[in-house]
Image: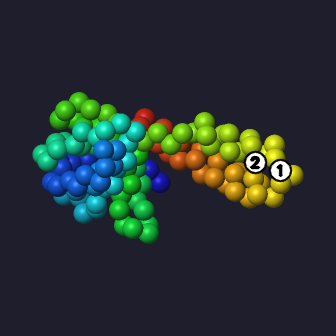
Amino acid sequence: MLKKLEGTVASYNAVSTYSVQFELDGVRKVVELTVSEPWVIHRGDEIVVAGEEDEKTGKFIGYAYKNVTRGVFGKYNPGVVGGYLFVIGGLLLCWAIFPLFFHIPIGLRVIRLGKKVTQAAESL
């Protein structure tokens, strides 16, 4: 279930150019955000992030964010077209056991993630 978190960045840790972990003042969750363009987040920035909690790690996984302080918006691009291609390829090659068992589930997961990212971006 998608949720939004809002707050001021208390601390952050750059994982890569496209991935960052940060904490918001007053929110007791580590937010892990991966976006398709370099992120723009600094200590003290007012941030709104949309995503969902990961039950396994306890982190909040962000799919889209808006940096209100700097006027920046970013979101993850899961490559939904690739998901559709996996499903279609699996259906066309259903005579072979491998594509049916691997391509279709992977394609459906990518499509589902794409829908979540779109909902998260629209909620900001």
Residue with the mark numbered 1: 94
89 vs 114, left or right, is: right
Which quarter of the picture shows residue 24? bottom left
Extreme-top residue of the structure: 71
- Mark 2 belongs to which amino acid? Gly
Q: CA distance from mark 2 to mark 1?
A: 6 Å
- SS state under label 2: helix
Please tell me how crowded label 2 is: few (under 14), some (14-19), or many (20+) other residues with Cα within 10 Å.
many
Marks 2 & 1, CB-CB < 8 Å contact:
yes
Of the pair 107 and 93, the residue shown nearer to us:
93
- Which quadrant does the C terminus fall into? top left
Q: Residue at x 24, y 39 (%)?
A: 40
Extreme-right residue of the structure: 95
Q: How is the image coloured?
A: rainbow
54 vs 25, left or right, is: right
Asked if residue 97 is positioned above or below residue 18 in the image, the reply reads: below
Please tell me how crowded label 1 is: few (under 14), some (14-19), or many (20+) other residues with Cα within 10 Å.
some
**Location of residue 105 in the rendering, given as x and y in whole percent from the top left corner:** 67, 54
Q: Residue at x 64, y 48 (%)?
A: 107
Of the pair 20 and 111, the residue shown nearer to us:
20
- Mark 1 belongs to which amino acid? Cys
Residue with the mark numbered 2: 90
